[in-house]
Image (cartoon, rainbow, N blue to C red):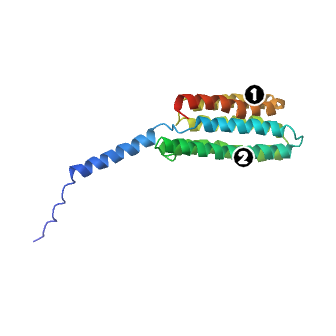
Amino acid sequence: MRLEDPPTPPTALSDRAIENLSFIRRTMEASGTFTSVSGTGVMGMGVLALLAAAYASRFPGLEARLLIWAGAAVLSGAVSGYAIVRKARHRKESARSGPGRKFVLNFMPSIAAGGALTVALLAAGLPDLLPGTWLLLYGTGVVTGGAFSVRVVPAMGLAFMALGALGLAVPQWGPGLMAVGFGGLHLAFGAIIARRYGG
C-alpha cells in the first residue's frame, strides 16, 4: 500500500500579494520612461563642446583637433553620467532601471559604429567626413535610446541627424556644425529638459 504525499500547504494570501506587487513593480520599471536624463548635464555637455570647438580652431593639424574633440567627448560622457545618477538619486530612482538600461543599450551601438567609422575614414584619407559622421551617428544613438525617455530626447537626436546629413553633404562646414550641434543643440535641448522635467 502506497502512502500519499502530504498535501503542500497553501501559500498565504499576504505572500501571494507581495509576489504580485513585486511582479507589477518589475513590469512597470521595465516598461516605463527613463526620466533621469539631466538637462543640466546636457547643458554641461554643450558648454564643453563649445570650449572644445574654440580651442580646436587654434590648431591647424588634424591630430590635435581629434585629440581635443575625443577628450571633450570622454569628459562630456562623465559629466552626463554623473548628472544622470545625481538626478536619479534625487528622485529616489535607479539610473540602472529597466528604461535606463534600455536607453544605454540602444545608444551605445551608434557610438561604437562612430568609433569604427572614424578609424576607417582616417585610413581612407577622408577626415572632412568625420564631423558629419559623428553628428549623424550621435543623433541616431540619441533617437534610439531616447525611445525609452521623454519625448524631447529623440527630437534632439533628430536635430543632430539633420546636422550630420548636412555635414556629409557640405563637409567644409564640418567644424562649424560640430559647434552648432554638440554645443548649441545640447544647450538648447538641455534647457528644455531642465525646465520641463526638473534638472
Q: Residue at x 75, y 46 (%)?
A: 70
**Image quadrant in which you'd find residue 44:** top right
Q: Is residue 124 visible?
A: no
- Left or right: where does residue 111 sit relative to residue 130? left
Q: What residue is shown with label 1?
A: 166
Q: Amino acid at mark 2?
A: Gly
Q: Amino acid at mark 1?
A: Leu
Query: In the image shown, does 36 or 162 lie closer to the viewer?
Result: 36
Q: What residue is shown with label 2?
A: 115
**Image quadrant in which you'd find residue 154:** top right
Give yes or no for contact between labels 2 and 1 (Cβ–Cβ under 8 Å): no
Residue 186, percent across and down? 66, 33
How far is mark 2 from mark 1, CA to CA?
Answer: 20 Å
Residue 93, percent across and down? 47, 43
Residue 91, percent across and down? 47, 40
Q: Residue furthest bottom?
A: 1
- Mark 1 lies on a secondary structure that is helix
Which is nearer the N-term, disc 2 or disc 1?
Answer: 2
Query: In the image shown, does 69 or 104 lie closer to the viewer?
Result: 69
